[in-house]
Amino acid sequence: MKLMQYEAYGLPAVCPAAAAGNRYGRFGYVPADPVSIMEAIRAAQTLGRFQSQPPLSWKEVTDRILAPQNYSDTALSSA
């Protein structure tokens, strides 16, 4: 939920790579890897604030939870 709040306000977020996905404004790092953490922080600082997209409705959220494979923004990788 916190990542969604950052996105709603157009604030870049630094988070573990698994949570970043391919979402605009999210910069992933590998936990315990100082280099990747610094790269994510620098990338977030470089981006700065951005124009946010309208938030999903509750129906859109639950649709993605129940069938993530149907949506490009929530599809699970095969790994």
Image (spheres, helix red, strand yellow):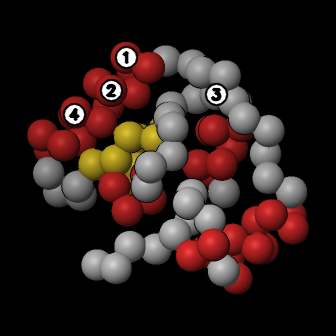
Disc 3 is placed on an element classified as loop
Q: Residues within 10 Å of mark 3 (few under 14, many from 20)?
A: some
Q: CA distance from mark 2 to mark 3?
A: 15 Å
Q: Nearer the viewer, residue 41 or 79?
A: 79
| Quadrant including the N terminus | bottom right
| Dot 3 or dot 4, earlier in sequence | 3
Mark 2 touching mark 4, by CB under 8 A?
no
Q: Tell me the number on the disc at residue 43.
A: 2
Of circles 2 and 4, the one toward us is 2
Q: Marks 1 and 2, how far apart in space?
A: 5 Å
Q: Nearer the viewer, residue 49 or 67?
A: 67
- Is 19 rendered above or below residue 13? below
Kindly state the secondary structure of the residue where label 1 is placed: helix
The residue type indicated by label 3 comes to: Gly
Q: Identify the residue position indicated by label 3 in the image.
A: 10
Q: Secondary structure at mark 4?
A: helix
Please name the residue that numbered disc 4 is placed on: 38
Give the residue drawn at x 37%, y 17%.
Answer: 46
Front of the two marks 1 and 4:
1
Report the disc number at residue 46.
1
Q: Position of residue 25 (x, y in %)?
A: 50, 35
Q: Which residue shows up at 33% across the image and 55% down it?
A: 17
Tell me the crowding category of disc 1: few under 14, some 14 to 19, or many 20 or more residues within 10 angstroms, Cα based. few
Q: Residues within 10 Å of mark 2 (few under 14, many from 20)?
A: some
Front residue of 70/68: it is 70
